[in-house]
């Protein structure tokens, strides 16, 4: 129970007509510490208790005084229509700092998810197409969500549902046979494949027979034609090699790369179940599943030429995941343009009689907007992920080599890589995921604003104080954290105590931005503390206590950044 809940409990116990939830929602933080740490404006109860607020305050106070106060509450003072609670800062600081010192990097962890499996599908780029910025957002989000669930004790399965099947492969094969050659492709696979793919679309506008050839090629692929399958395999392997380079750079890994093609042989069963349930209907030659909600377009299962589509493969994939992993939750980190698709997929699963469809969640996210560049795969003017990352690293390197404090780093390249990549990941996980992301270098690499480098810098600053103390032979382990009672210290303590709630909230809402927000606030408060409270120059006991607080904060920043996929650096 936190202090607010304790205070609300004391108030609610005074009269049976008081609803604790109303009290909790009504608690305020007084602007001035002289008025207490938590205040309750009693007019919020005037209606139910039918009394004037000052009278209510006095009456509740009388009840509270009947018993000894809980240890974290030092005193309660009624003032006008308010009840002001003064916390025992010393007791709270001691409890929090002791706990973090003891748990170290495990602080905030829990085992509440033990025995439950969460499948997190993310990244899922398309073979032979560039890994573009949207896939990077999915990668950043999914990687973080998986880490958050791991941290809460769930067992997680990271799945990369590669887009390695579908009519576009028919087009690519047609294009490759007309204009491609293996040697050129192998040199720069994705760009070369993209070139012929774009050319296909241009030429098909003039010559519609190309589309027929593409359809025939895809059918041949679905039927297992050897030569065509060999070509397809070439595209897959070449693309994967490039994707893996990205994943290595980002420190991301997967437990499964079962992409769309993995489900080709699992589709007949799915179609059979639908037939058995009598939910498959014919519509203009295609087979579809209709929904009771008529505003929802039917889900197409088989096209008129008998080939399966994206949705069918997703249905087979969900069933496979249920059987194979027996998931507690099955999460899809995919952009919001696919919201309807997932509604159709989950709706179809439900109609097939699978109640676990309710455990499937689409975790959507908005677009990335480049104020100066447009993005589209069809037309070839794409912003490639690799360019974004290399540019981030190069720009960071410029900034740090010009900075007076970091120009003498001996590992500039390693630092630039961690800070540059961290800056990009931070930007993707900064705002609630359904909002569009505005990508400007100015904000991403603003060392003073709300940015990855700002938080990483706070960490490095903390570590540098700690190593100075170590060099000076100061052992702060015995420091009495009960001394940490000033506003700056105590606020920092309170924020540290809120870490677990932030992680839990982020998990529940599949919203890493809650952790990003948390760690940014923590870094800001650390800087306030650092700028207001002398650490090394404080007298001995207080210095030790402040060093302990610094160590706890650094630990917590490191863990929180890890949860969003960002590495720390000891110096920058
Ligand atoms: N490959 C798809 C794309 O790039 C995303 C796949 C999403 N996942 C899924 N299970 N449908 O748009």
Image: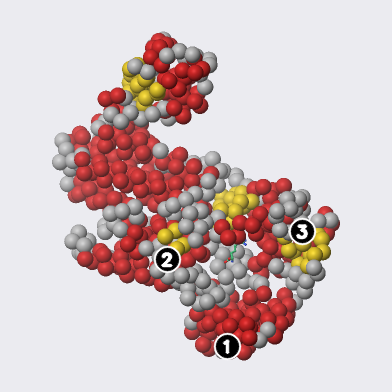
Q: Are there few (<14), some (14-19), or many (20+) residues within 10 Å of tag 2?
A: some
Q: Which is in the foreground here, disc 2 or disc 3?
A: 2
Of label 3 and label 1, which has the lower sequence position?
1
**Is 304 situated left or right of 9 in this image?**
right
Q: Please tell me in which quadrant of the rendered image residue 179 appears.
A: bottom right
Residue 308 position by quadrant:
bottom right
Quadrant position of the N terminus in the picture: top left
Numbered badge on residue 289? 3
- To which residue does mark 1 refer? 180
Identify the residue at horizontal 77%, vertical 74% (top origin): 305
Q: Mark 2 falls on what kind of element?
A: loop
Asked if ligand 1 lies within 8 A of label 3, the reply is no
Residue 91 position in % (x across, y down): 33, 27
First along the sequence among labels 2 and 1:
1
Q: Position of residue 504 (x, y in %)?
A: 49, 42
Q: Is residue 110 above or below residue 437?
A: above
């Amino acid at each position: 129970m936190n202090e607010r809940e304790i205070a609300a409990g004391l108030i609610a116990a005074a009269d049976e007509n008081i609803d604790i939830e109303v009290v909790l929602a009504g608690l305020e933080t007084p602007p001035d510490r002289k008025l207490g740490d938590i205040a309750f404006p009693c007019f919020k109860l005037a209606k139910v208790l039918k009394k004037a607020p000052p009278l209510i305050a006095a009456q509740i106070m009388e009840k509270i005084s009947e018993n000894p106060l809980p240890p974290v509450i030092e005193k309660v003072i009624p003032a006008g229509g308010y009840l002001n609670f003064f916390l025992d800062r010393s007791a709270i600081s001691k409890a929090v700092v002791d706990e973090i010192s003891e748990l170290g990097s495990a602080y905030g962890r829990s085992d509440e998810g033990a025995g439950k499996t969460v499948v997190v599908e993310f990244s899922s780029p398309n073979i032979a197409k560039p890994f573009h910025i949207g896939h990077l957002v999915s990668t950043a989000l999914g990687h973080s969500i998986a880490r958050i669930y791991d941290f809460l004790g769930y067992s997680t399965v990271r799945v990369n549902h590669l887009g390695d099947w579908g009519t576009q492969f028919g087009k690519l094969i047609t294009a490759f046979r007309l204009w491609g050659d293996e040697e050129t492709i192998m040199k720069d696979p994705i760009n070369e494949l993209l070139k012929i793919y774009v050319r296909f679309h241009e030429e098909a506008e003039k010559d519609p027979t190309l589309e027929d050839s593409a359809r025939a090629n895809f059918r041949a692929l679905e039927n297992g034609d050897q030569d065509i399958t060999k070509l397809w395999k070439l595209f897959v392997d070449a693309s994967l090699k490039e994707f893996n380079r990205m994943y290595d750079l980002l420190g991301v890994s997967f437990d499964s790369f079962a992409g769309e093609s993995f489900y080709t042989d699992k589709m007949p069963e799915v179609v059979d179940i639908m037939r058995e349930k009598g939910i498959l209907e014919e519509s203009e030659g295609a087979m579809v599943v209709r929904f009771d909600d008529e505003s929802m377009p039917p889900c197409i299962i088989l096209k008129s030429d008998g080939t399966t589509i994206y949705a069918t493969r997703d249905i087979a994939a969900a069933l496979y995941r249920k059987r194979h992993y027996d998931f507690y939750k099955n999460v899809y980190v995919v952009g919001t343009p696919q919201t309807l698709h997932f509604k159709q997929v989950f709706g179809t699963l439900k109609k097939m009689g699978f109640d676990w469809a309710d455990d499937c969640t689409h975790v959507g996210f908005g677009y990335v907007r480049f104020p100066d560049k447009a993005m589209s795969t069809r037309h070839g003017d794409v912003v490639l992920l690799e360019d974004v990352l290399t540019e981030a690293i190069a720009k960071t390197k410029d900034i740090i080599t010009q900075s007076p404090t970091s120009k003498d780093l001996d590992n500039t390249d390693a630092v630039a890589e961690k800070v540059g990549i961290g800056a990009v990941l931070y930007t993707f996980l900064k705002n609630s995921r359904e909002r569009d992301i505005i990508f400007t270098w100015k904000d991403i690499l603003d060392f003073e604003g709300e940015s990855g480098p700002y938080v990483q810098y706070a960490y490095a600053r903390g570590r540098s104080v700690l190593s100075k103390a170590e060099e000076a032979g100061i052992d702060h382990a015995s420091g009495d954290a009960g001394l940490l009672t000033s506003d700056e210290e105590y606020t920092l303590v309170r924020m540290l105590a809120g870490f677990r709630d932030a992680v839990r909230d982020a998990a529940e809402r599949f919203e890493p931005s809650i952790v990003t927000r948390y760690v940014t606030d923590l870094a800001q408060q650390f800087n306030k503390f650092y700028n207001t409270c002398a650490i090394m120059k404080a007298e001995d006991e207080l210095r030790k206590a402040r060093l302990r607080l610094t160590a706890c904060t650094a630990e917590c920043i490191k863990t929180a950044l890890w949860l969003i996929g960002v590495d720390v650096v000891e110096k920058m």
